[in-house]
Image (cartoon, helix red, strand yellow):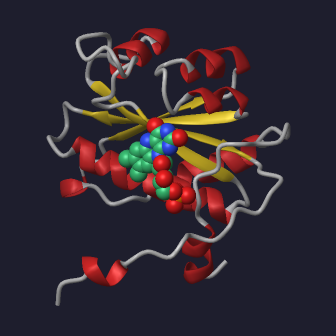
Amino acid sequence: MDFKTLIAKRRSIRKYDARPVPQEVIDRLLEATLTAPSSRNSHSTHLRVITDPQLLEQLASMRDYGSAFMKSAPLAILVLGDTSVTDKWLVNSSISATMLQLACVDEGLGSCWVHIDGSLCYKDEPDGPTADQFVRKLLDLPEHLKPLCAIAIGYSDFEPAPLPAWDKAAHIHQ
Ligand SMILES: Cc1cc2nc3c(=O)[nH]c(=O)nc-3n(C[C@H](O)[C@H](O)[C@H](O)COP(=O)(O)O)c2cc1C
């Protein structure tokens, strides 16, 4: 797929059919994700693959807004940053997550970013637990690995509409 087609096809997909994602496809997604550049080549990004339906359902309940759809995904890949190797882990992880979403398009998969870092579990409880704390406990993450987001992934049985037009010119300064 050429680059222009790839970026035009990328949309957030939150509904998936029942097909599992084959292991060889998962392997290619992981490989592509880890080609992302990183500050001082620090390679701070780590990936956790989740295919267990029970675990996906638990992960989907990390927040009371914007994460529930993940329970119907056959796959989620958690994008984590190793805070012990660079202070740029968040930026590195963001680039990796974007690379992963583009790799999904190339494999004919739909995906959607589910945010973790800095997000609350309950939107009306500003002093309540955070999604980071929830995920950390659920997956028993080591202290130095910070979850940025989960990318929910699966096959979509519909072709999403192209990106709606918006005023890009107002965002370009030259
Ligand atoms: C940093 C970031 C966080 C996001 N968090 C969520 C989320 O928690 N839940 C969700 O359903 N979509 C989430 N999204 C997807 C956006 O809502 C989506 O990219 C945006 O509405 C534009 O739609 P498009 O991806 O189809 O172009 C997130 C996207 C980004 C880049």
- Residue 79 in view: no
Residue 131, quarter of picture: top left
- On the image, the x and y values in percent for residue 165 come to 50, 76
Judge from the rendering whether residue 117 lies leftward or rightward of residue 14; answer left or right: left
Q: Residue at x 21, y 32 (%)?
A: 83
The image shows residue 86, relative to residue 100, as above or below, that is above
Residue 117, quarter of picture: top left
- On the image, the x and y values in percent for residue 159 come to 76, 63
For the image, the number of numbered tags is 0
In this view of the protein, which residue sits in the foreground, 150 or 29?
A: 150
- Residue 122 in view: yes
Q: Residue furthest bottom?
A: 174
- On the image, the x and y values in percent for residue 14 come to 65, 43
Quadrant into which the N terminus falls:
bottom right
The image shows residue 132, relative to residue 88, as above or below, that is above
Judge from the rendering whether residue 128 lies leftward or rightward of residue 25; answer left or right: left
In this view of the protein, which residue sits in the foreground, 37 or 157?
A: 157
Judge from the rendering whether residue 90 lies leftward or rightward of residue 124; answer left or right: left
- On the image, the x and y values in percent for residue 30 come to 55, 47
Q: Residue at x 14, y 41 (%)?
A: 87
Q: Residue at x 70, y 34 (%)?
A: 73
Q: Residue at x 74, y 41 (%)?
A: 23
The image shows residue 9, relative to residue 98, as above or below, that is below
Quadrant into which the C terminus falls:
bottom left
